[in-house]
């Protein structure tokens, strides 16, 4: 059996080293020494100024929307994981979908301005599969219309653009550290901003909006994460370069083996150092996709249709909107297995089955 992904686990002894410290201190959560160390180490590794370690990537998005005081409409992409849209609705705002670019698979900046109304307060875009959005174009539009920008960087851990972390763009960027992501802390999320005031505000929101022993300064939530999760994060961080290198090797092997396949790949932004988070292929038709998916499943090899169907027409709490490019891509895109333990023989087999179908 080959799953689509398999969470990375460090040697158990490396995790246990952190556990004994937790037992000694008896400090289990509330941003203890391990969570604080993880924040420091991640800031260094990613090269970002301010970073908060939070419960998960969804709460990170909700906290970002809350901290920016957004209301009314938020322009977003229909080609993402459901949490990108649901967090907008959860925060009492209205998602307004803008179709994606068919090459980059990210929100199409040339279509953003037509979607702006007097109610628009922000743009929330996803760096799909870790490929940076058209940051420059989005920034120009946001400045011109006085909009805030949030990037859902759930796939973009470790990605950099022109030598700078992709997390350092926009007003706020969030990341997910869920077990299915390339770098994980079992459950977990990150919030990154370059703005000191926003950072302070989100640190307070993360802790119920408490400002002192007997006082509250604002509406908050429990967005903290535990020492146990931070321990997994610290143990995994020692492996991160090997994890990313391995994934890039896997992608090279897939690309080499699949040259003969009539499929396209996502167009990546220039000047990017990628992270090997996903390996999607864009097939000719849904029919071809279903045949390949079935042929692989018959051999117990599992793929995923990230992201199918379009969020603009599948959520029971929203009116359905037609997004032609998203619908077309969503029907034809398939993510192949990619994880640390995947072997060259596995990849050869997956590719052989695909090519024979
Ligand atoms: C995984 C993911 C999320 C949600 O993160 P969680 O940590 O699972 O809450 C949000 N957006 C995107 C694009 C994701 O892939």
Image: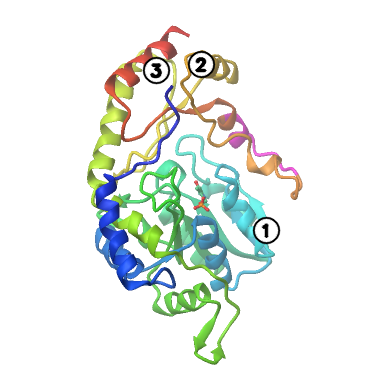
- Give the colour scheme shown: rainbow
Q: Is mark 1 within 8 Å of ligand 1?
A: no
Range of residues picked out in magenta? 320-328
Point out the frontmost of discs 2 and 3. Answer: 3
Residue 355 coordinates in the image, percent (x, y)? 41, 11
Q: Earlier in the sequence, mark 2 or mark 1?
A: 1
Q: Residue at x 57, y 18 (%)?
A: 290
Residue 161 coordinates in the image, percent (x, y)? 31, 52
> Residue 89 has which mark?
1
- From the image, tell me which residue sits under label 3: 350
305 on left or right of 319: left
Indicate yes or no whether the magenta region holds residue 323. Answer: yes
Residue 172 falls in which quadrant of the image?
bottom left
Q: Which of marks 2 and 3 is nearer the N terminus?
A: 2
Circle 3 SS class:
helix
Q: Distance between the residues labelled 1 and 3?
A: 39 Å
- From the image, tell me which residue sits under label 2: 292
Q: Distance between the residues labelled 2 and 3?
A: 10 Å
254 on left or right of 67: left
């Amino acid at each position: 059996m080959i799953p689509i992904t398999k969470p990375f686990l460090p040697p158990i002894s490396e995790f246990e080293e952190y556990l004994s410290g937790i037992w000694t201190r008896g400090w289990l959560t509330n941003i203890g020494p391990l969570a604080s160390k993880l924040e420091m180490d991640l800031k260094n590794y990613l090269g970002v100024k301010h970073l908060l370690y939070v419960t998960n990537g969804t709460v990170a998005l909700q906290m970002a929307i809350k901290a920016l005081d957004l209301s009314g409409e938020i322009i977003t992409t229909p080609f993402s994981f459901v949490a990108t849209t649901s967090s907008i609705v959860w925060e009492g705002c209205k998602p307004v979908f803008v179709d994606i670019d068919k090459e980059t698979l990210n929100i199409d900046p040339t279509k953003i301005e037509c979607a702006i109304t007097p109610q628009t307060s922000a743009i929330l875009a996803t760096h799909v599969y870790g490929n940076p959005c058209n940051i420059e174009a989005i920034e120009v539009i946001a400045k011109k219309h006085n909009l805030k920008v949030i990037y859902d960087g759930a796939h973009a851990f470790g990605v950099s653009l022109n030598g700078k972390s992709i997390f350092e763009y926009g007003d706020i960027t969030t990341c997910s550290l869920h077990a299915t992501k390339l770098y994980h802390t079992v459950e977990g999320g990150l919030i990154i901003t370059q703005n000191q005031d926003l950072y302070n505000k989100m640190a307070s929101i993360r802790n119920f909006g408490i400002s002192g022993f007997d006082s509250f300064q604002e509406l908050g939530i429990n967005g903290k994460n535990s020492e146990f999760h931070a321990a997994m994060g610290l143990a995994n961080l020692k492996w991160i370069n090997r994890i990313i290198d391995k994934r890039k090797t896997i992608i090279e092997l897939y690309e080499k083996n699949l040259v003969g396949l009539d499929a396209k790949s996502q167009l990546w932004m220039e000047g990017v150092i990628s992270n090997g988070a996903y390996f999607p292929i864009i097939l000719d038709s849904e029919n071809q996709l279903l045949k390949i998916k079935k042929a692989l499943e018959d051999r117990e090899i599992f793929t995923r249709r990230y992201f199918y169907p379009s969020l603009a027409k599948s959520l029971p709490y929203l009116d359905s909107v037609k997004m032609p490019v998203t619908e077309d891509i969503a029907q034809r895109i398939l993510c192949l297995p990619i994880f640390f333990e995947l072997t060259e023989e596995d990849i050869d087999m997956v590719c052989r089955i695909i090519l024979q179908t």
